[in-house]
Image (cartoon, rainbow, N blue to C red):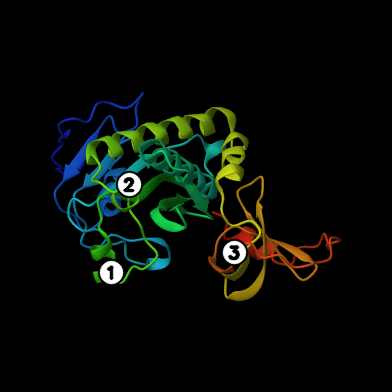
């Protein structure tokens, strides 16, 4: 294993069972996920967690950068090694989003929501995001690295300077600074709780929570996936974690893609009878992993 220095920051107690039992804490890294991926390749155990005060090259979905100023947010990546029957990348991504939303709600006392598939929202603005990466062998994932960013003590001036107009933080929403250690601990607790539910009972209990948290149903959205672009009405999240979008008289299942909300609470009389044939399903399923 690489020669990483293991430090348990003062004030962080052990989570419930295993998540974060081994925490590698850095003042500065390029990306916590880069470090965690290197450790996973060297057989680091499940639950191994990398935390940094600052990232120079933090990343989000589709190669986007993640704004990571010093000591402002939680920048964290955790290694998971799930059972083969519970190793769906889309499920892992969504359970992490549920854990983050529960963490934010617990800390703030406000209702956090999920913008499919990997953004956590508070009062209509983005407060956190998830990026899941893996290594494949023989068509199966060998492990998952769940990267997460939570905006904790960012100020409005920080977001303005970084040209991130649709972001918020716990500090902005609550009007005071938050204890960074407590937020980190709560996220690890929620991650472990949600992950263990998934490993013992499958995705359905997670899906039930997602249906209560998701914020996209009823919106008119633009979907870009696998080189295709179309618009439609978001109907909600399916039982396998896919986004259901009605475009014309077809309901399409989207497992991966870029979703832009063009209009919230879109209400338009559409035919209730829809074709059962889903021409997009084969494309979306081919990229499901």
Residue 15 location, x and y as percent?
Answer: 32, 27
| Residue 248 vertical position relative to residue 26 in the rendered view, above or below | below
Q: Which labelled disc corresponds to residue 188? A: none
Q: Which residue is mark 2?
A: 174
Crowdedness near tag 1: few (<14), some (14–19) or many (≥20) residues, C-alpha within 10 Å: few
Give the percent coordinates (x, y) of residue 116: 54, 55
Which of discs 3 and 2 lies nearer the camera? The answer is: 2
Q: Which residue is mark 1?
A: 160
Dot placed on the residue nearer the N-terminal end, 1 or 3: 1
Tell me which numbered mark, 2 or 1, is placed earlier along the sequence.
Answer: 1
Q: Secondary structure at mark 1?
A: helix
Q: CA distance from mark 3 to mark 2?
A: 25 Å
Query: Which residue in the protein does label 3 denote?
Result: 264
**Can residue 81 be seen at all in this image of the molecule?**
yes
Residue 205 in picture, x, y percent from top left: 59, 34
User: Element under label 3?
Assistant: loop
Image quadrant containing the C terminus: bottom right
Identify the residue at image location x=44%, y=30%.
193
Decide: few, some or many residues near mark 2? Use Cα within 10 Å; few <14, some 14-19, many ≥20.
few
Q: Residue 187's quadrant in the figure? A: top left
Q: Is residue 254 left or right of residue 198?
A: right
- Where is the N terminus found, in terms of image quarters? top left
């Amino acid at each position: 294993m690489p020669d990483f220095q293991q430090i348990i920051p003062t004030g962080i107690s052990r989570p419930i069972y295993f998540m974060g039992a081994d925490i590698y804490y850095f003042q500065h890294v390029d990306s916590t996920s880069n470090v965690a991926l290197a450790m996973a390749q060297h057989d680091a155990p499940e639950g191994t967690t990398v935390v940094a005060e600052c990232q120079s090259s933090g990343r989000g979905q589709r190669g986007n950068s993640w704004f990571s100023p010093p000591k402002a947010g939680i920048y964290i990546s955790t290694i998971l090694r799930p059972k083969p029957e519970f190793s769906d990348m889309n499920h892992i991504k969504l359970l992490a989003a549920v854990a983050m939303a529960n963490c934010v709600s617990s800390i703030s006392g406000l209702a956090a929501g999920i913008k499919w598939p990997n953004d956590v929202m508070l009062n209509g603005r983005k407060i956190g995001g998830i990026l899941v990466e893996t290594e494949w062998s023989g068509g199966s994932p060998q492990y998952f690295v769940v990267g997460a960013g939570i905006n904790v003590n960012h100020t409005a001036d920080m977001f303005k300077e970084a040209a991130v107009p649709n972001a918020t933080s716990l500090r902005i929403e609550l009007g005071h600074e938050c204890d960074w250690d407590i937020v980190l601990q709560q996220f690890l607790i929620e991650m472990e709780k949600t992950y263990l539910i998934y490993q013992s009972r499958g995705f359905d209990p997670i899906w039930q929570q997602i249906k209560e948290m998701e914020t996209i149903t009823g919106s008119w959205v633009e979907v870009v996936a696998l080189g295709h672009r179309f618009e439609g009405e978001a109907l909600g999240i399916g039982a396998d974690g896919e986004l259901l979008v009605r475009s014309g008289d077809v309901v399409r299942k989207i497992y991966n893609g870029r979703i832009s909300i063009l209009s919230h609470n879109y209400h338009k009389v559409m035919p209730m009878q829809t074709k059962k044939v889903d021409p997009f399903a084969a494309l979306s399923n081919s990229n499901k992993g």
